[in-house]
Amino acid sequence: MEAKNKLRMTKQRQVILEELRKVKTHPTADDMYQMLRRKMPKISLGTVYRNLEILSESGMIQKLDVGGTQKRFDADISIHSHVRCIDCGRVGDIDVKPHCNLEAEAQKMTDFEIFRHRLEFTGRCPLCQQMRKTTA
Ligand SMILES: [Zn+2]
Ligand SMILES: [Zn+2]
């Protein structure tokens, strides 16, 4: 196991991080694999997956466990909320920050040590709204 505080930046890891930073689509490991194959034809899905996990464990990217679907990854590690399309699963950013300190409020009510919370919105993306209009 690698120590969290001394993450080795391999070439592959560097490229994965760069590619993830280019997009706002919150890609899954599969999506990333498709993107990376154009640059690194020899890369395997397992390698992509493992490196995404390592990068998220080190805090350089964030992992989204939204709605029990495939894990998605985000190079934007600032605190922001996500909205998930109930039809196609697309995930977008919403720059909503809670007005009160929810962690502190929650901490008063539990023996668990609270680190953070996740706020997830669900809705329908513009493409799927359009789709419903044209097929209705
Ligand atoms: Zn959609
Ligand atoms: Zn995001």
Image (cartoon, helix red, strand yellow):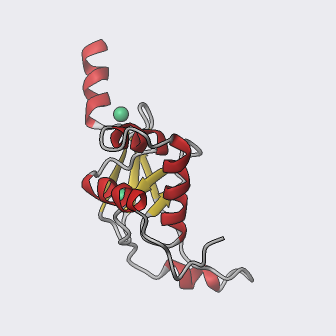
Tell which residue pokes out farthest to the right in this image.
111
Assign ligand 1 to one image quadrant.
top left
Percent across and percent down for residue 101 are 47, 82
Foreground pick, 44 / 83 = 44
Image-quadrant location for residue 111: bottom right
Q: Residue drawn at (67%, 83%), measured in percent from left and top?
A: 113
Whole-percent x and y of residue 68? 59, 45
Left/right placement of residue 52 relative to residue 134 reads: right
Tell me residue 112's x, y (percent): 72, 80
Classify the position of the N terminus by image quarter.
bottom right
Figure quadrant of residue 62: bottom left
Residue in view at x 32 percent, y 47 percent: 25
Q: What residue do we see at 53% from left, 82% from top?
A: 5
Determine whether 61 is above or below 49 in the image: below
Quadrant for residue 94, please give it.
bottom left
Residue at the far top in the pictured view: 135
Q: From the viewer's perspective, is 22 left or right of 53?
A: left
Quarter holding the C terminus is top left
In the drawing, does residue 104 fall left or right of residue 38?
right
Q: Pick the residue in front: 25 or 44.
A: 44
**Is residue 14 shown above or below 8?**
above
Picture layout, residue 27 above or below residue 38: below
